[in-house]
Amino acid sequence: MSVVSGINSYIMNSYYGNSMKNPNGNISKDPSALSDALRNSAVNKQNPLANKNSEVNKIAEKLFGRRDEKNSEKEKLVAESAAALEKSAGRLAAGDTFAKDNKGKYNIEAISKNVSDFVNDYNDTVNALKDSKSSVALDRGEAMGKTMSSYKNSLSRIGISINDDNTLSVDKDKLSKADPQDVKNVFGGNYSISAKTVNKAQDINAAAKFEMNGTYDRDGRLASYSGTMVTALLSTNV
């Protein structure tokens, strides 16, 4: 039985069939679509296919190997930490934290809390990245650290210091006594450290999720779901 026949047999009897049909109603043989079908077959816990089509199972095993569950848990922590950082950074960048009341005064308590939340989420992300295997997530994390370092002097003036392990520390007393405008200059607005961190956190989150949901080849490397690999196998039998 050919690989194409095996995959098409699976597709015809699965919910992937609808999304993989081309306009004339026939099953697509697009390599990327077939690659997705193989990948979903390989990641059994995400989309069980065992005993439904042994041909697809065999080729998925050969191409993708098995998912590293232990690593997936670590990447999940990276993704969750980055998602939390994206929210806390976005809250500061949006500017509501620095709105003045009807007397023209800043809410010092709200500013201190939101900045502290940002620091905690930033530190969680930095620490989680230490166990990540995603080169993309690690690259974005490094870029995030360099951006933070470029604000070192401005951060220091409002009570925030950068530690040797790239995490942040907050002197809450100094932060609460800092000029709110200085804090706003660092964290508020579209060009602030907060806005830049939002972008890095989004990238880290996406990269960690890809790594988390991936499968690994026999040598422990994250498998590439390229159409080229699938196309090369389509002309062979299992």
Image (cartoon, rainbow, N blue to C red):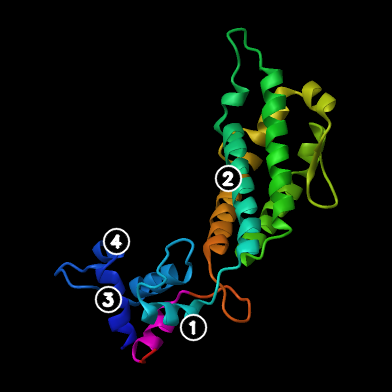
Query: In the rendered structure, which disc, 4 or 3, sits on the residue that comes first in sequence?
Result: 3
Query: In the rendered structure, which disc, 1 or 4, sits on the residue that comes first in sequence?
Result: 4
Identity of the residue furthest to the top in this view: 103
| Number of residues whose C-alpha sits closer than 10 Å to that of mark 1, classed few (under 14), some (14–19) or many (20 or more) | some
Q: Position of residue 60 (x, y in %)?
A: 45, 78
Q: Taking 74 as reference, is 19 left or right? A: left
Magenta segment, prevailing SS (helix, strand or loop): helix
Mark 1–mark 4 CB contact (< 8 Å): no
**Is the residue 99 above or below the residue 80 in the image?**
above
Q: Quadrant of the N terminus?
A: bottom left
Q: Position of residue 29 (x, y in %)?
A: 28, 77
Secondary structure beneath dot 3 equals helix
Q: Nearer the viewer, residue 145 or 82?
A: 82
Q: Which residues are magenta?
A: 225-235
Amino acid at dot 3? Ser
Identity of the residue furthest to the left in this view: 24
How many tags in the picture?
Answer: 4
